[in-house]
Image (spheres, helix red, strand yellow):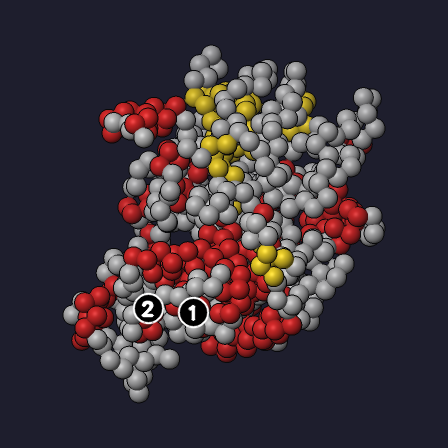
Amino acid sequence: MRVLVTVSGTLAMCLGAAILSNAVAWEGEPPPPIYNPYPPGILPPDLNSELARVLREVDVIEGRALQRWHALTPPVLTGQPPTLQGTGTEAIEILGELMNYDKTISPNENVACASCHMPYVGFSGPIPSVNLTMVAYPGTAHFRAGKRTAQRYPYAPFFPVLQYNQAQNSFFGGNFWDSRATGYLLRNPDAEQAQHPPVDTQEMGNPDTACIVFKLSKAKYRPLFEQVWGKGSLDIQFPGEAEDICEIPGGAAIFGSNTTPLRLSPEDRLRANEAFNHWGQAIDAYEQSVQVSAFSSKFDAYLEGTYTLTADEKAGYDLFRGRGNCNSCHLDGRSTAPTPPPPQGTAPNGQDTGAAALTAPLFTCFGSSNLGLPLNPRDAIYYQDKPDSFGFTANPAGFGFRDLGLGSFLRSVAAPNPNSTWTQFAPKSDGLMQTSSARNVAMTPSSCPTTEAPGPYFQKEFFHNGYIKSLKQLVHFYNTRDKRGYAFNVTSGHCPKGTIEKVNCWPKPEVPNNLDMTIGDLGLSDHEEDLIVVFMRTLTDGFTRPYANSDTYTGACKTGGSAATQGNEFLIPTPPLPPCSAGICDVPPVPGPLPIP
Amino acid sequence: MNRLHVKPASVAAVAGLLISNSIAGQSTAYKAEELPPAAKAARVHITQGPELESAGDNSAIIRWRSDNPGGTDEHYGVVHYGTNPRELTQTAKSHIRLNRSHSYTIFRVRVDGLAPRTTYYYTVDSMEANGKGDGVKSVVKRFTTSGAIS
């Protein structure tokens, strides 16, 4: 439905006279031209067919969720305070699932939340060729795209509200790579996270949060929404032009700075805001459910005593919490009172022999760090420096863009920071990205049983900018980033002759400040790196019971090559970089002590 | 109702006081896996190093291993350095996270902004996130940056 049959006076008042001449009166007309500011090779050649493939898979899961809903024994609202007794929990989880796989929420009905987060890859990016090339996934307006990889859903609901911890002088919690979903209002970062992509100009791109509510009011599962959140929760008098306005992607010039182009009465706006909060809360319920955060890995079985790690898995685990030091941030829930080494205790090499302190460790400390990833010149964000047909430009700075992560958020550059007392900490937060749970980092479709070449493998992308393409490379980066002779003062694509990027050449960090030095020269052998990869596979859900909807992948696997150089054939030379954009690096308090190059 | 009536000026003054004395959204209450700082070690000995891990024209990495100092998980290695061994007036610090299940800690500090082909002298220490030092004693050592002869 991309139709604007009539343009009423109300709509004209709402959007101004400009829309009368520029409007999307597209019935019978061709759709807007494809936005393609990218040089050849940035958009993968199979992009359209892969987007269509994922949408088909999304529809399969949506169909299953509808069946679950129809089979659900309706909960009974009873008690004081009123509670949906019996199946209330399942009802809100199914509601969140139905929303998550609902492509009709997007303006062009071509993007669901799940389009960038499919279960068979632990809810990370589902398109191998995108993971190899443009890094960020296309949104509803083809082909706008974001700037970072799709973070995994599982265990995100367990992150606390973002807080500045004065004892540790550090931030903990929040959702997103830059922690910008703080949870300050709903007291739930995951629920607030779910509110961002639907109105992100480069993702779903709704121009108004009320557009999501408008579409929920027409959804098949509206009765379930009203059952969970109450009768009348979607009874909103939307203007006749709502459908037309909601089909124009956010950021379009005709909206100007107006973030509420749907004209609603104050009462209806309040109701729409409340329903949009319920959108986030229901999706959070789904993500926290066993459908997503399953705690069903080999490692969980090991903690329960029902699985014995193989010799390689155990050796990898010992390295993970030993010389690899991975569990300093990816906490494994071991005893915090280690047995000391001889002669005081019995632990060899000072390794922990204590019992597990947590039965369901999350493999994150909820913190953030700057690991020193090089700038990835394939990232689609750098090329979106020209306006699209709606007059929207995602990144006017082009290659002047620098991703300062948490620091940019604290300065309200990336998103509004709700706490001005945090702004002072921006310089020491530049380059920091959230420590994701290590759980499910290795999850792939069963048809492509590994992330690693020669496979058959599923091509994933790792870290916030997708620079790393295999788990072998990920561990090798931690192990050798600073190793003597490996660190070069070059950008990606310019490693010296005789070296191999990601093997024995690491380009310089994008953000030189606040580098985390817990890692960088771990002294692990090649085989020891491999063992840590083996261990990480024990963190994949679906071992003790099937992982819901992990059977839906219908794409192909890749084969050949080696994990160490996986994806290197797609490296491109970073162009000469202009200085960091003033809109990023000149915003006080400015980055320091080193300037951002 | 009168008790709730506060003059706007008073509100502003109170709000200012609150902001100046605290950081909104701070927390000293620990949740989930975020634990209170570990007990601080009585004395922290360096068991290996400090030594130069690597040096370029304008930067160097200094490394040492000590007992696990305990205290805040968020920790910093500190290098005091200068070109005169009696005037180590410059400071570099790098973040690491302590591993509570380790009896030892490896500190690594990046020292940037150095001059090529120059000898620097240094001592090291480590400190908690709040700046409280671990009381590490280290001898004065030295390293020389690389670089072409100009």
Q: Are marks 2 and 1 on the same chain?
A: yes
Q: Quadrant of residue B10?
A: top left
Compared with A420, A290 (above or below) is below
Q: Is residue A377 visible?
A: no
Tell me the SS state at disc 1: helix
Name the residue beneath numbered marker 2.
A238
Tell me the SS state at disc 2: loop
Which chain is mark 1 on?
A: A
Which chain is mark 2 on?
A: A
Q: Residues within 10 Å of mark 2 (few under 14, many from 20)?
A: many
Residue type at numbered disc 2: Phe
Counting the numbered discs, the total is 2
Q: Are marks 2 and 1 in contact (CB under 8 Å)?
A: yes
Name the residue beneath numbered marker 1.
A217
Q: Residue at x 65, y 19 (%)?
A: B41
Residue extending furthest toward the bottom: A28
Q: Quadrant of residue A500?
A: bottom right
Q: Residues within 10 Å of mark 1 (few under 14, many from 20)?
A: many
Where is residue A276 shown, x and y percent of the image?
A: 42, 58
